[in-house]
Amino acid sequence: MARFNGATWKPIPTNYTAGGQDSVHGVVIHIMDGSYAGTDSWFRNSRAQASAHFGTSRAGQLCQWVDTANRAWAQAGGNRAWLSIENEGRGGDTLTDAQLSRCAEVLAWAHKTHGVPLRLTTDPNGRGLGYHGMGGSAWGGHTSCPGSRVVAQLPEILKRAKAIAGGSSPAPTTGSYTVKSGDTLSGIGRALGIKWQTLAQLNGLKAPYVIRPGQKLKTKASAPKYAPFPGEAYFKGKPNGPLVTAMGRRLVAEGCSAYSSGPGPQWTNADRESFRKWQRKLRDAPAYCDGWPGKRQWDALKVPAV
Ligand SMILES: [Zn+2]
């Protein structure tokens, strides 16, 4: 399925099940109870019978040992449906600030790539960000992994992942899924965090919803047509980017130009004056015609997504 390009790819030759990641319900946090280098070499030893998809060092290195198409051997009965991150440290440690960020990056990526919802879970049958001990004996009985002090840090990982992912957009996924033998539409939907009805609709499937192995299913609607409102503070920060140009072009098209040149990517007073013209065109009350875009006014302008 996938490798995270934010992680150093350090494939291990053994200790995983090729093609065995049946679904991705979430990300499980572990503590190595050892060092980053030591864990890396142990996972290359076939006697270990253990691995993880990702690893972090206390200094903030991040590696990926196992492609997420493959089942890492990190939490016994939880392996088939969960990705794993091993973190350098001893039992009872907290994760370093850098490790919290690396875990958040993996979680945000898993959200984007595998539709993992950005929430905490303590349910081995749930979805989201979890930890090894929550699986109890079915997950190998490692109730002290990663330890209560790390479990207390999970909300911080979640918070950072949300910031990376850009808020609470609906769980996006990769654009397509190739049907495997034995798949059902509802099973695929559960694995990807998409309603099966949505999958059917995206792919023009009608009852009895027949799918065949090898068939490629669309798992994502085409990109939204219009750019979402980036927030008033975005404009007040004098942004420089393609969104400003796209907005300017729409203002010009609406006959709301105060530009003597442009529009261009750098937010200037001409952008503000042009937007003020748009606010007046919307017949907004004077208090709302200050040149700073508001959400309703922005949405009405229908700025193409950039
Ligand atoms: Zn563990």
Image (spheres, rainbow, N blue to C red):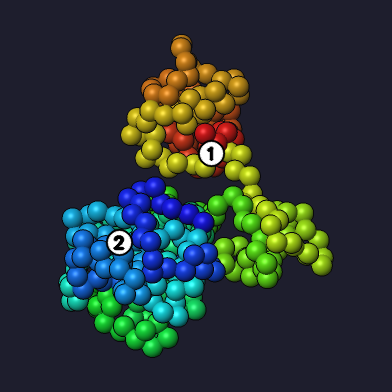
Q: Give the quarter of the image for residue 97.
A: bottom left
Mark 2 secondary-structure assignment: strand
Beta carbon of the mark 1 residue lies under 8 A of ligand 1: no
- Which residue matches tag 1? 227
The answer to the question of whether label 2 and label 1 lie on touching residues, with beta carbons closer than 8 A, is no
Q: Mark 2: give few (<14), some (14-19) or many (20+) Cα within 10 Å.
A: many
Query: Along the line of sight, which residue is nearer the eye, 9 or 300?
Result: 9
Q: Nearer the viewer, mark 2 or mark 1?
A: 2
Mark 1 secondary-structure assignment: loop
Beta carbon of the mark 2 residue lies under 8 A of ligand 1: no
> Which residue sits at x=78%, y=65%?
209
Q: Identify whether 278 is placed above or below 288.
A: above
Q: Give the x, y percent position of residue 151.
A: 28, 74
Query: Along the line of sight, which residue is nearer the eye, 168 or 236?
Result: 168
Examine the rendering and report whether any part of residue 29 can be seen. Answer: no
Q: Give the quarter of the image for residue 207.
A: bottom right
> Which residue sits at x=74%, y=61%?
212
Q: Amino acid at mark 1?
A: Ala
Say the numbered circle drawn on residue 65: none
User: Residue most toward the right?
Assistant: 207
User: Residue most toward the top?
Assistant: 260
| Alpha-carbon span between mark 2 and mark 1 | 36 Å
- Which residue matches tag 2? 55
Q: Left or right? Give the position of 93 relative to 21.
A: left
Q: Give the x, y percent position of residue 163.
A: 37, 52
Q: Identify whether 150 is placed above or below 133.
A: above
Examine the rendering and report whether any part of residue 236 can be seen. Answer: yes
Q: Give the x, y percent position of residue 152.
A: 26, 73
Q: Identify whether 217 is placed above or below 188.
A: above
Q: Mark 1: give few (<14), some (14-19) or many (20+) Cα within 10 Å.
A: some
Query: Along the line of sight, which residue is nearer the eye, 125 or 59?
Result: 59
Q: Give the x, y percent position of residue 256.
A: 55, 21
